[in-house]
Amino acid sequence: MRLLYSLLALLPCSLLASAKSLTGDKVLVLLDEIAAKDQYSIFFNSLTERGYQLTFNDATDPSLNLIQYDERNFDHLVLFSPSTKSTPHCSLTATTLVDFTNKGGNILVASSSAMSPVIQQFAAQLGIDFDNQGTSVIDHFQYNETSEHTVIASDRFTPVTAIFSPTVREGAPVLFNGIGHLVSPLVYTTAILKANPTAYSYETKENMVVDDDITLIGSEIALVSSHQALNNARVTFSGSLDLFSDRFATSSVKIHGSEKRYVKSGNEAFFNELSQWTFQEKGVLKAVSVKHHKVEEEEFPGWYRINDNIVYEIELSEYFDNSWHPYSAPDVQFEAIMLDPYVRVTLNRTQSESPSSTKYVGHIALPDVYGVYTLRVNYKRAGLSYVLEKDVVPIRPYRHNEYPRFLTVAFPYYVSAGSMLVGFVVFSIVWLYNRDAGVPKKKTN
C-alpha cells in the first residue's frame, strides 16, 4: 500500500516532466561552439521547463547522426550554427536536413549575416531565398535607439492566430539583427515576421556606399519564416541568431523618433511561442472520425449509385494548451473527385457528441457519371497542420431493372410507337376487308 501511494505521488511529477509536443521530447541543439549556449540560456531553460530533453553538440562533429537505421534519433533539431560549413568529415548537409524533415522531425534554424551554405541550400529547397552572405537588414527609422541601425524593431507579425497569441501580436516589438530573405508564394511557406516598409537589405562593410542594386527592400523582406511539409513536419527559419539571445530578450526598446519606451522587448514571448508552434505544441489538427452513408441509412454499403443522396461527416480537433479542443471553421470542404472534382461542397458545422471535437456534416447529391471516385476532405491552412482524409468509392450506373417503367421525357417516343401500332392495325383492316370491284368479265358465245 505504501508503494502504491508513492507511485501516485510521483504521477503528477511525471506528467509535468513530459513534453507537450505531439512529436516527442528529444531535442538536439547544434552550435558553432558548445560554450556559446550560455548566451541563450533563457530560451534553453524555457524548453527544459516544458519537459524537453536537450542534447548539445558541435555542428561539425563527424559522429553526428540525425537518422540511424532509417529512424530519426531525435524528434526536434535546433540549429544555432550560422557559420557551419559542409566538409567531407561533417555529416550535417542540406540533404541530411531534408531527410530528417521527411522522417517527421521539426527544425528550428537561426542564422546571421555569416550565412552558412548548408542553411542557404536547405532553405532554398523549401522555397525560402536568403540574401547574399555579408548582408544585413537595415532600417534608419525603425531601429532601437540604444543600438546601431542594423538592430531593428519590428511588430509586423503574421495574422495567423494559430502561431501567435494576442500577447505577442499586441506586445512589445521584436529586436532583430541579421539577414533577410524572400518567401515564395507557396501554400506550404509562411512569413511569420516581416520588416518595416522603411527597411532594406545591404552589405554592412565600412565606407560602403549604397547604390541602386538593392535586392530586398521594404515589406517584402521576411525576417522569420516557416515551412510545413506534407507530412506536417515544421521548419522555421530566423535570419537572426541574436533574436534568441539573453541580451535581446532582456533589452529595453525605444524606437527612434517614438516617445514610447518598452521596458522589455517582445523577444522572449516571441521565441517561446515560435518554438511551441515549431515543435507542434499547438496548431495541430486531426480528424477524429470520418464516415459517409446513404440518406436514411447508417452504414456504408460498399458502393454508391449515380445520383444517390449521401451524408458525409467528419469531426476535427485542434491541439493547444496541452489538450485537444473543438476546431471550428467555416471553410471545411468536401470533394468528390474522378481526375477532376465533380462535386465540391462546404460542410456545415454541428454539435459533436465529443466535447473535444466539432462535427462537420454535408448532404451531397452524387454526380450522374459513373466511375471510381475519391471522396476527400483536403484542408490546408497556414499555421495549422494539414488534414487529408480520403476514401475511394465505386459509383455504378443503374441496372436494367432499376429504371422506372415509364419516363416522362420518353412520352414522345411512347406516342410515336402507339401511333405506328394504330396505323398498322388500321392499314391491315383496310387491306384485308376492302373488296376491289376489279374489271368486268367479257361474255363469250
Image: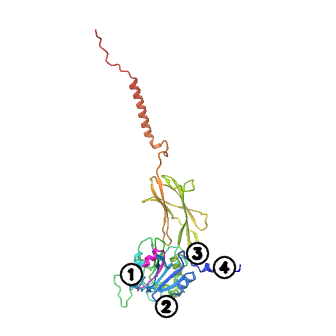
Asked if labels 3 and 1 touch by Cβ distance under 8 angstroms, the answer is no
- In percent of width and height, residue 38 lies at 51, 89
Gap between marks 1 and 4 measured at Cα: 55 Å
The circle drawn on residue 7 is 4
Instruction: Name the quadrant containing residue 83.
Output: bottom left
Q: Secondary structure at mark 3?
A: loop
Mark 1: give few (<14), some (14-19) or many (20+) Cα within 10 Å. Answer: many
Gap between marks 1 and 3 measured at Cα: 37 Å
Q: Amino acid at mark 2?
A: Ala
Q: Which residue is tagged 2?
A: 35
Specify the color scheme: rainbow
Q: Which residue is tagged 3?
A: 322
Q: Secondary structure at mark 1?
A: loop
Q: Earlier in the sequence, mark 2 or mark 4?
A: 4
Q: Amino acid at mark 1?
A: Asp
Q: Amino acid at mark 3?
A: Asn
Q: Amino acid at mark 4?
A: Leu
Can residue 287 be seen? yes
Can residue 173 be seen? no
Q: Earlier in the sequence, mark 1 or mark 4?
A: 4
Q: Earlier in the sequence, mark 2 or mark 1?
A: 2
Q: Earlier in the sequence, mark 4 or mark 3?
A: 4
Gap between marks 2 and 1 measured at Cα: 28 Å
Q: Earlier in the sequence, mark 2 or mark 3?
A: 2
Closer mark to the observer between disc 1 and disc 3:
3
Residue shown at 49%/91% (left/top)? Answer: 35
Q: Which residue is tagged 1?
A: 131
Gap between marks 4 and 3 measured at Cα: 23 Å
Q: Secondary structure at mark 2?
A: helix
